[in-house]
Image (cartoon, rainbow, N blue to C red):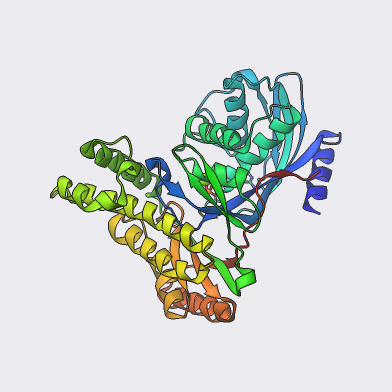
Amino acid sequence: MRAQQVRAGFVELYGTEPEGVWSAPGRVNLIGEHTDYNDGFVMPFALPHTAIAAVSRRDDGVLRLHSADIEDGVAELRLDDLVPESDRAWTAYPAGVVWALREAGHAVTGADIHLTSTVPSGAGLSSSAALEVVVALALNDLYELGLPGWQLARLCQRAENVYVGAPTGIMDQTASACCEEGHALFLDTRDLSQKQIPFDLAAEGMRLLVVDTQVKHSHSEGEYGKRRAGCERGAALLGVDALRDIPYADLDAALARLGDDEEAVRLVRHVVTEDERVEKVVALLEAGETRAIGPVLVAGHASLRDDFRISCPELDLVVDTAMSAGALGSRMTGGGFGGSAIVLADVADVDTITKAVEEAFAAAGFTAPRVFEAVPSPGARRLV
Ligand code: ADP
Ligand code: MG
């Protein structure tokens, strides 16, 4: 249905049929926060919310871009003019992908693109990665590049890091490109090895809610950079390439070596314990003990709040209220300082928890949150 609408939109804009229609999802991260730039583990799953793009090739070095969600005309760019950090608009994401493909030596000669997305933008659910991956997959198919999902994800990350100029890890793009329906993706961000872990909550009478606080604190980007630099400093102090190289069993010794460097102690402790929590969640899910992941999620939130210090009152209120109202587990997800939290709950408790969170937000004078259910959905694919 949406695929047909996007196809029709393309015909209206460009006057011809698109060669195909592709989709790529947003994601939530079940566990493994701020580990991806420490070479560690993450465990995202794909949302039912997707970016959908109708695309055709061109052979004249021109890239035409249009988003049904942005009130603007068709942007027309020349491939030879694409320069990193030259574009502050949304078009930098798809243009960055074309730039990254060409820079990697792939003979992309132009494209007409019309897209739309249901991934909430700026909510920590990776609308930017969905946009990048849908374009990358379309061009991969049309230009017969034969790149596997993990490699498309790398190129999309490069587009976002270098062309857009946003420092992000590899999780978002890999999740969008590689997730599978009914599964969470256990990803080792060092070598990009991955494992699909069955995560079918409905079959076990549970649900996973996403609570979008609709808050984005303005200092979030600067704080991300500080945490990232702080983790690199911690790794340097401990003489390892990345904090991933500190085994959980050696954590106490590592912290002792950091002495009274309180900042380094807190950052190192979060990253090392968070990697351990991801492995614990994988083990529990593989053992069929889904309910038991709840306390691990809550411990992850406490670590992000107290050690990594990237939570905010709205996120803490979701977690505290949900847990008091009977949730099995809850934690903030994404970069922090706003965005979304997740809540794991028995089906019977979903309405009570949702109501409790909404009432708590109203009582605190916060903007009403957007609550929706997240079913582990398919990764990027061709629709038409
Ligand atoms: P997140 O990835 O968490 O949603 P980002 O700031 O990384 O937040 O990406 C959001 C940006 O992605 C938007 O500001 C916009 O430039 C772009 N974007 C997202 N969805 C769309 C869309 N449907 N059409 C055009 N641009 C979009
Ligand atoms: Mg993003």
Left or right position of 214 against 311: right
Answer whether residue 366 is visible to the viewer in this image.
no
Residue 91: horizontal and vertical position, in percent?
A: 61, 35
Task: Return the residue nearer the eye: 291 or 354.
Answer: 291
Image quadrant where residue 64 sits: top right
Task: Return the residue nearer the eye: 329 or 305.
Answer: 329
Residue found at the far right of this picture: 16
Left or right position of 236 against 123: left
Task: Return the residue nearer the eye: 275 or 126.
Answer: 275
Residue 308, relative to residue 244: is it above or below? below
Left or right position of 250 against 75: left
Residue 307: horizontal and vertical position, in percent?
A: 28, 57
Residue 154: horizontal and vertical position, in percent?
A: 54, 34
Residue at 76% across, 24% down: 58
Residue found at the far front of this picture: 287
Left or right position of 1 against 291: right
Q: Quadrant of the C terminus?
A: top right
Residue 337, relative to residue 229: is it above or below? below
Residue 30, relative to residue 195: is it above or below? below
Q: Quadrant of the N terminus?
A: bottom right
How many numbered callouts? 0
Residue 86, relative to residue 53: is it above or below? above
Image quadrant where residue 375 sits: bottom right
Residue at 71% across, 43% down: 115
Answer whether residue 236 is visible to the viewer in this image.
yes
Residue at 65% across, 34% down: 136
Residue found at the far left of this picture: 260
Residue at 18% across, 51% down: 262
